[in-house]
Image (spheres, rainbow, N blue to C red):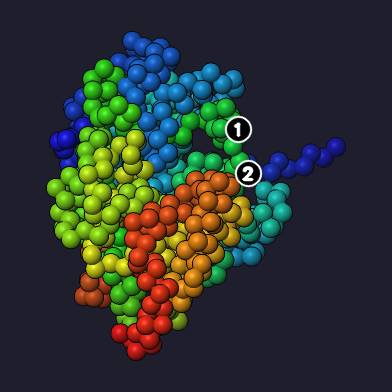
Amino acid sequence: MPVKQLLSRNCGKIDPRNIDDFIKAKGFQSLEHARSTMSPEGVIEEVKKSGLKGRGGAGFPCGAKWELARKSKGPNKYLICNADEGEVGTFKDRYLIQNDPFSLIEGMAIAAYAIGAAKAFIYLRAEYHYLKGLLAGAITQSEQKGFLKGLDIEIREGAGAYICGEESALMNSIEGKRGEARYKPPFPPTSGLFNEPTIINNVETLANLPLILGKGAAWYQKLGTGQSKGTKLFCVSGDVARPGVYELELGSSLWELVDGQAGARDIKLVQVGGSTGRVFPADRLDTPLAYESVLGSGAVMVLDQSRDVVEFVHRTMKFLNEESCGQCAPCREGTEVMVEILGRLDAGQGVPGDLRTLEYLSQAMMLTALCGLGQAAPLPVLDTLEHFRSEYENRIGQAVFIRSLKALGA
Amino acid sequence: MVKKQKAKARDALLGMIKEQQDSQGHVSREAMEHLARSFSLPLGEVYGVATFYTFLSTKSQGRHVIRVCQSMPCHLKDSGQVVDWISQELCLEPGQTTPDGRFTLEVTNCIGACDQAPAMLIDDVVYGGLDPQKVAQILRSMD
């Protein structure tokens, strides 16, 4: 399937600091159209029909989520834009904000109109502080031109925590607390920020809305596959000639992206969806990038044949262990034990039974962890155990040899 | 009856801790005690927030905080070497501050600059595509 320029249509073409550029490129027409000709319920219906699903990683149907919030009782409803792009290897939201912040603001205004929110937050990660001025400028200009009537958009900054990309941890952070995940239910559309009905959408999800309302759901849902409509921004990094953001129609193959677009050679494995993403060996690159198969946040990391699988998984687990908020035991202790075992394997000190323990622990974590971090942390372990098992086994079988090599400094 | 002075809205706490960090270079015990009083919160609650986030520090930090990304995309482009270059140039290890208080060196997780790997943040600025000359030049250009 071909490369598309829908979400990225304005990127590099307009001045992201100047609203007039955006307006000339038909900016805010979708919002005006929605406000003047459609009811909030009508907007929700259109978004449901489009088939738009969340682009942050979880992939929940956007319209269905909105409908829950719309129907929830409560004097205050909140919209939150999740700009806490902390997933390893993901930088598409940065790219969108840097190049076309107005599409995000327009999308937020459409979402707020649909769910009936008068207050919206953009939760911007601390690492992206340099985007704050640009975003604040886009909000101010949109206000001055009268596009944000009845809507107050406030930027709240994070302070460095991967877990705050998880929606309930994010809400705790906006409430000024430790960014720990909450038990669900209740789900945010019924009780979220300050216990009020809340919708949390990713930057890219919101940036899709002007397209959908502008060109219509019928047009939009012709793009993609059965369960995956539209296009997606993919962030390719690692062992490739051309790392960067690529917009592809959903359903395009992983091969087309990493080989065709990014110029990867000699591929050993590709991890899709960030640190807790699925791992594909070179002979599985015909996999389509879609919700039916694999998608996540759109992070696509390529490792070539020179890379060591066990070291890669050990490093990934160290990251997850560091970023575990520590609230639930399966994640806090599970990632700890995994780091220990993977560390031993990596150092050539594996013992028989290590792989079974990893698999056993994985099942427990996936079933019992409180949030997505702990639930998904075992995925790269299980996927690499499936596709690269001999590399793990060698770490045990040839442990003495590996240790002597390390001792010799080879 | 004397009305108790109304405590500040709880959701402002993180922002106010961040203000301390930005203006003082760290969040001191005195600052936390002051915040606890003005928010009518236990000190432990304020401490809990101040120590949860990696961009907040209860220890004094340098004028510039260098954060070298160690996540996989940067690791694949030898981010470990970037740490070594800086360590050599400034004679300090990750987690330390130079004696003159100019720099604190830290390693950090993904900063979303994977297309420019290896990358680092110094304060709020991203520097990508790093090599030894570039790193030395950047460090020398800072006050």
The residue at the point 46 percent across, 77 percent down is: A349
Q: Quadrant of residue A219?
A: top left
Tally of numbered discs: 2
Q: Which residue is mark 2?
A: B10
Secondary structure of the residue carrying tag 1 is loop
C-alpha separation, residue under disc 1 versus residue under disc 2: 21 Å
Badge 1 crowding class, 10 Å Cα cut-off, few under 14, some 14 to 19, many 20 or more, is few
Q: Which mark is residue A186?
A: 1
Instruction: Using the image, determine if residue A62 lies above or below residue A306.
Output: above
Q: Nearer the viewer, residue A391 or A341?
A: A391
The residue at the point 30 percent across, 85 percent down is: A410
The residue at the point 20 percent across, 47 percent down is: A255
In the displayed structure, does residue A33 sit left or right of residue A83?
A: left
The residue at the point 55 percent across, 46 percent down is: A367
Q: Chain of mark 1?
A: A
The picture places residue A320, in percent across and down from the top left corner, at: 47, 58
The picture places residue B121, in percent across and down from the top left corner, at: 35, 62
Q: Residue furthest right?
A: B1
**The disc labelled 2 sits on which kind of residue?**
Arg
